[in-house]
Image: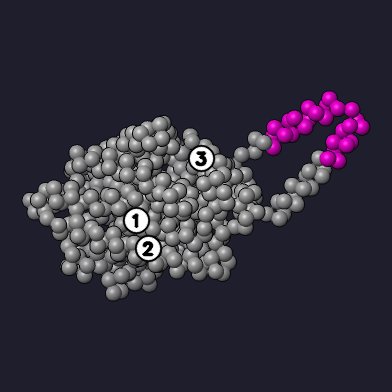
Amino acid sequence: MELTAGNVWVMISAALALFMTPGLGLFYGGMTRAKAALNMIMMSFVSAGIVGVVWVLWGYSMTGGQSILGLFGNPFASFGLANVPASELIKVGFSGTFAIVTVALISGAIADRAKFGAWVLFVPAWITLVYCPLAFMVWGGGLMSAGGAVTAVFGQVIDFAGGTVVEISSGVAAFVLVLILGNRHGFKKDPSHRPHNVPFIMLGAAILWFGWFGFNAGAATTAEQAGLVWVNTLVAPAAAMLSWLLTEKIRHGHPTSLGAASGVVAGLVAITPSCANISPLAAVGLGLVAGAACAIFVDLKYKFGYDDSLDVVGVHFGAGIVGTLSLGFIALPVNGEGGGLLYGGGLQQLIAQTVAVLITIAVSGIGTAVIALAIHKTIGFRVSHENEVAGVDRSEHAESAYEFGEILRGHFHALFQHHTPAAGRAGDARAAHSADAERAKQDSFA
């Protein structure tokens, strides 16, 4: 097979899309408490490890090929990528990065309180039972693909890069997990639940924006389409950031760094399904709507009392809905036919998009509930109250993201030893030994 410019672009795009997952880890790690930062980063990294293996073994086979009732592909048809031609391996890698970041997105909703082992079980089960079927239905020849049963009745669904498969499905799954695990200790009351490292958040958002150019434009089939996707992926998050900041200023009096980063992500989510099917001007409008809407959506958790820790539901489900349904209004006509309502295309596209949203909610909601409840009722999905208060970095990984406190304590202890008489130091040593014993007891209990 000749290595064409198109193949090179897909490989570069795949690398960019893979880079989004560690970027997401930094984004989430900065948003959570210091004593849970490593756990959040690890949940993203381990998702890459697990899904990478699953994708080669049976995941890719389930997203295309031999259809089973229009719901998913035969997982054994190309098990281990057997029978997959070498010319298709680039596509295998590119599509695998989508699956990786999708399941990693879910983790932010259950920050501070999930067992790492339970997450390790959840990831392959969710990819197999939820993500792969949805990817097959929308992109692999299933119910919502061209020629599928849903398409034949309601019209062609537009989802270029994953508004349903990636964003809405992960947002719904996040909401289901939040309901099953329950709220964090001190939710709405404990000030320590605020982000501990805003520079991490900004860096993570920058990496996500950078990687999203590959995520969206990697599937472009022409230079013209790639250019449209690239510009829309630039301008929609830019507009969303500005509208989020304006909304914050009006509602709370201050535009924040966290708001800027969240606005960028909201705009990226919203443009994902429509990046190849709307004009740059429409992308500006979509970004403005998505940024303002999600700035309001994220506060709903306080009103309704569900602890979506890092606003996965508010941003990914909220902006995913906005972006997917927007195509019913602003989708460009194809060869002068169809298009959204604003182009005289009628209700057909809006109906198709709405049906796709409803199917995605049902598949992800039911599938996630079955998987999460099975884990929760067996090994348990949530850490103990004591471990949550102490911090999941210590209880789940025996690590800490920051050791400055230990270093400073040792420094001051050395100074104190130097200036204290021997008899006093003996008493201090006994006190220090007792304190160390108490810490060891707490660590073993955790």
**Residue 38 in picture, x, y percent from top left:** 56, 46
Q: Give the residues in magenta.
A: 406-431
Say whether marks 2 and 3 touch (CB < 8 Å).
no
Q: In the rendered structure, which amino acid carries the disc numbered 3?
A: Pro
Q: On screen, 28 above or below 155? A: above
Instruction: Quadrant for the C terminus, please.
Output: bottom right
- Residue at point 49% right, 42% down? 31
Say whether marks 2 and 1 touch (CB < 8 Å).
yes
| In the image, farthest residue toward the front | 303
Q: Could you tell me what secondary structure mostly forms the magenta stretch?
A: helix
In which image quadrant can residue 56 be found?
bottom left
**410 part of magenta stretch:** yes
- Residue at point 46% right, 42% down? 27
- Residue at point 40% right, 49% down? 300
**178 part of magenta stretch:** no
Colouring chosen for the image of the structure: one colour
The tag earlier along the polypeptide, 2 or 3, is 3
Relative to the observer, which residue lies in front, 243 or 320?
243
Count of numbered tags: 3
Q: In the rendered structure, which amino acid carries the disc numbered 2?
A: Ser
Relative to the observer, which residue lies in front, 403 or 180?
180
Q: In the rendered structure, which amino acid carries the disc numbered 1?
A: Ile
**Residue 53 in picture, x, y percent from top left:** 45, 60
- Find numbered disc 2 in the image and state the secondary structure of the residue it sits on: helix
Q: On screen, 154 above or below 202? A: below
Identify the residue under disc 2: 364
The tag earlier along the polypeptide, 1 or 3, is 1
- Residue at point 89% right, 27% down? 421
Identify the residue under disc 3: 195
Number of the label disc, if any, that sits on residue 168: 1
Q: CA distance from mark 1 to mark 3?
A: 25 Å
**Residue 269 in picture, x, y percent from top left:** 33, 47
